[in-house]
Image: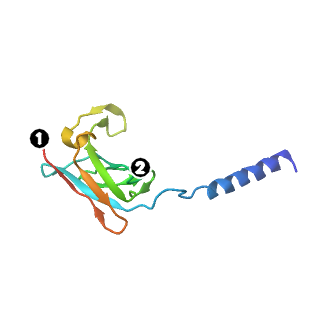
């Protein structure tokens, strides 16, 4: 067998085994979670909604980003959803700001009061179940 043929054979074997390793592994079953974020009755655009598991509740949290209507869906690693459990929730708009061409133009100001965006101060919670329709809306109020 020539060197080129061996290379092709080993490359194909490598790809075959990589495809076989693409399963969910030990990831938990996920529940679909969506909702809306408003501040004083107005939709909050580009907010990050961060679900942080309470002790022993879930292996890790999930995150979502709100659209122009304040609507979000949670993502766990790279899949839509969230593991079941009890979560503390923080909502923030702080982050990087980009222009229409995708160029970084500076930091985005925080528009959410600290009682919601600070993970140590937030009183927002959510219970996620595999059996329920998990629509979790947040109606925030200014300080």
Question: Circle 1: is it few (<14), some (14-19), or many (20+) Cα within 10 Å?
Answer: few
Given residues 82 and 53, the one toward you in this image is: 53
Image coordinates of residue 136 in percent, x first then y, are 26, 58
Splitting the image into 4 quarters, where does residue 20 fall?
bottom right
Q: Residue at horizontal 46%, vertical 58%?
A: 28
Between tags 1 and 2, which lies in front? 2
Q: Is residue 27 visible?
A: yes
Task: Kindly identify which numbered label has been placed on residue 126.
Answer: none
Q: Is residue 47 visible?
A: no
Q: In the rendered structure, which disc, 1 or 2, sits on the residue that comes first in sequence?
A: 2
Residue named by callout 1: 143
Q: Is mark 2 on a helix, strand or loop?
A: loop
- Horizontal side of residue 23 vs 14, given as left or right: left
Q: Residue at horizontal 67%, vertical 53%?
A: 15
Q: How many marks?
A: 2
Image coordinates of residue 143 in percent, x first then y, are 11, 41
Q: Is residue 30 above or below residue 125?
A: below
Given residues 7 and 137, the one toward you in this image is: 137
Image coordinates of residue 39 in percent, x first then y, are 16, 48
Residue named by callout 2: 60
Q: What is the C-alpha distance between the residues marked 1 and 2?
A: 30 Å
Outermost residue to the bottom: 131
Question: Circle 2: is it few (<14), some (14-19), or many (20+) Cα within 10 Å?
Answer: some
Q: Residue at horizontal 37%, vertical 59%?
A: 84
Kindly check if marks 1 and 2 are in contact, taking CB atoms under 8 A apart as contact. no
């Amino acid at each position: 067998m020539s060197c080129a043929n061996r290379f092709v054979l080993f490359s194909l074997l490598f790809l075959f085994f990589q495809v076989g390793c693409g399963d969910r592994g030990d990831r938990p079953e996920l529940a679909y979670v969506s909702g809306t974020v408003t501040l004083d009755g107005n939709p909050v655009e580009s907010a990050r909604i961060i679900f942080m598991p309470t002790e022993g509740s879930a292996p890790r949290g999930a995150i979502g980003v709100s659209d122009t209507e304040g609507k979000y869906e949670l993502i766990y690693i790279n899949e839509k959803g969230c593991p079941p459990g009890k979560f503390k929730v923080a909502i923030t708009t702080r982050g990087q700001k980009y222009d229409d061409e995708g160029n970084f133009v500076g930091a985005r100001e925080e528009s959410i009061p600290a009682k919601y965006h600070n993970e140590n101060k937030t009183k927002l919670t959510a219970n996620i179940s595999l059996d329920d329709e998990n629509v979790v809306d947040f109606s925030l109020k200014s300080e």
